Image (tube, grey):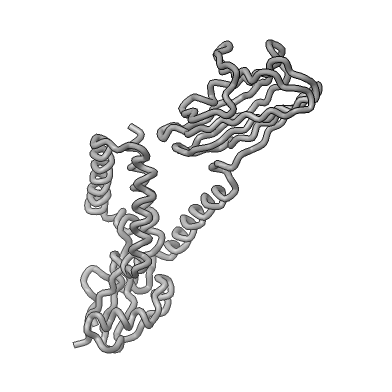
């Protein structure tokens, strides 16, 4: 029984962490972030399964995480009012070629990072952007001026 | 200039209705930070704590953590300082010392081990006047163990109670 509870607590904690650390940190995976992610996974696993090496334990933990993932996804789909809390909301960061400083600052994004994201979308300048939107997955999508 | 579908300037540019979001984030981060500070302050173990009792020329010191976490290894040290001779020093431990906790080893081996009215007795033998007797127990908390229990310790000379220390251990998940 405690395996299921441990897995649920770890799921809730990791979910909370990913919601509060900010979307940009999640989308910009530098080598250090990747190593950190593996480390967190390893630390959480130890806390969940501890000395349990059984297949039963693996099935219980895997099943709990899978079920909770589907449950959160279903809640987000079924109850739109929960979506901002569960998934976050997009934020407009560029309007008509001009960065919106307040929204950038709030999401800890520099103009340089914004310009780099624009270049990755084959846009030479932020001025070429009609709309820049920081999506809930941390990516910035650009709609160019025509 | 049309706004992309599903977005509104009020909600997604001016962030109306989302003013409190950063504060909620900072609050959650502060709470996580608070938990970390509590961890640094030994609230979740496992820094040992010293308890001492003394009377009639005998002192008993217990050096052992009062806060533990599931799966941790830890050591408990019992020191008897005798200004007078003890014929048959005996340590009586509450069952809470062993409940959900595996005893890995004890050093030095006691003269005898027994059950005394539900408590565990370690017969340490004679302790001469002016000497110190040190007794180590090495444990590991069972990985699924949690809770709070008494870990009282009593020192006897034969059947005569000499000293007692009341302590409690808390095991965090």
Q: Residue at x 48, y 39 (%)?
A: B72
Question: Residue B126's image quarter?
Answer: top right
Q: At 24% across and 85% down in the image, what residue appears?
A: A123
Question: Which residue is at a point 38% across and 69% down the rendered structure image?
Answer: B15
Q: Position of residue B108 (x, y in %)?
A: 59, 27
Q: Is residue B20 left or right of residue B149?
A: left
Q: Is residue B65 above or below residue B21?
A: above
Residue placed most toward the observer, B51 or B89: B89
Residue A81 position within the rendered picture, expressed as x and y whole percent measured from the top left: 30, 55
Task: Please state which of residues B105 and A54 is positioned toward the viewer in this rendering.
Answer: B105
Direction left: furthest residue: A146
**Quarter-of-image position of residue B107:** top right
* Position of the C terminus of chain B by quadrant: top left
Indicate whether B81 appears above or below A129.
above
How far from the left and from the top, in percent, is residue B87? Answer: 72, 15
Q: Nearer the viewer, residue A89 or A61?
A: A61
User: Which one is in front, A35 or B39?
Assistant: A35
Which of the 4 image quarters holds residue B51? top right
Quarter of the picture holding the N terminus of chain B: bottom left
Pinpoint residue A2: horizontal percent, then vertical percent. Answer: 36, 34
Report whether A44 appears left or right of A63.
right
């Amino acid at each position: 029984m405690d395996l299921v509870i441990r897995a649920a607590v770890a799921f809730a904690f990791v979910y909370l962490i990913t919601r509060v650390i900010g979307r940009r940190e999640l989308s910009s995976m530098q080598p250090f972030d990747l190593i950190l992610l593996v480390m967190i996974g390893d630390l959480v696993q130890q806390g969940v399964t501890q000395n349990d090496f059984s297949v039963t334990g693996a099935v219980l933990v895997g099943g709990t995480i899978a079920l909770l993932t589907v449950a959160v996804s279903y809640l987000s789909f079924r109850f739109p009012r929960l979506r901002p809390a569960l998934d976050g909301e997009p934020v407009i960061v560029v309007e008509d070629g001009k960065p919106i400083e307040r929204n950038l600052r709030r999401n800890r994004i520099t103009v340089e990072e914004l310009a780099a994201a624009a270049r990755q979308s084959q846009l030479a300048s932020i001025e070429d952007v009609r709309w820049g939107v920081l999506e809930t997955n941390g990516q910035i999508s650009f709609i160019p001026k025509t | 200039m049309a706004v992309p579908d599903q977005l509104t300037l009020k909600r997604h540019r001016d962030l109306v209705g989302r003013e409190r979001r950063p504060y909620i984030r900072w609050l959650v981060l502060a709470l996580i930070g608070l938990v970390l500070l509590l961890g640094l302050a030994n609230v979740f173990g496992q820094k040992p704590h010293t308890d001492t009792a003394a009377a009639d020329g005998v002192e008993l010191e217990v050096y052992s953590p009062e806060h533990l976490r599931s799966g941790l290894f830890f050591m408990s040290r019992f020191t008897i300082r005798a200004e007078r001779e003890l014929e048959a020093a005996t340590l009586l431990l509450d069952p809470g010392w062993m409940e959900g906790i595996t005893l890995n080893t004890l050093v030095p081996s006691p003269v005898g081990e027994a059950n005394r009215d539900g408590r565990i007795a370690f017969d340490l033998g004679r302790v001469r006047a002016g000497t110190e007797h040190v007794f180590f127990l090495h444990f590991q908390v069972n990985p699924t163990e949690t809770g709070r229990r008494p870990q009282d310790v009593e020192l006897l000379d034969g059947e005569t109670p000499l000293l007692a220390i009341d302590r409690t251990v808390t095991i965090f998940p």
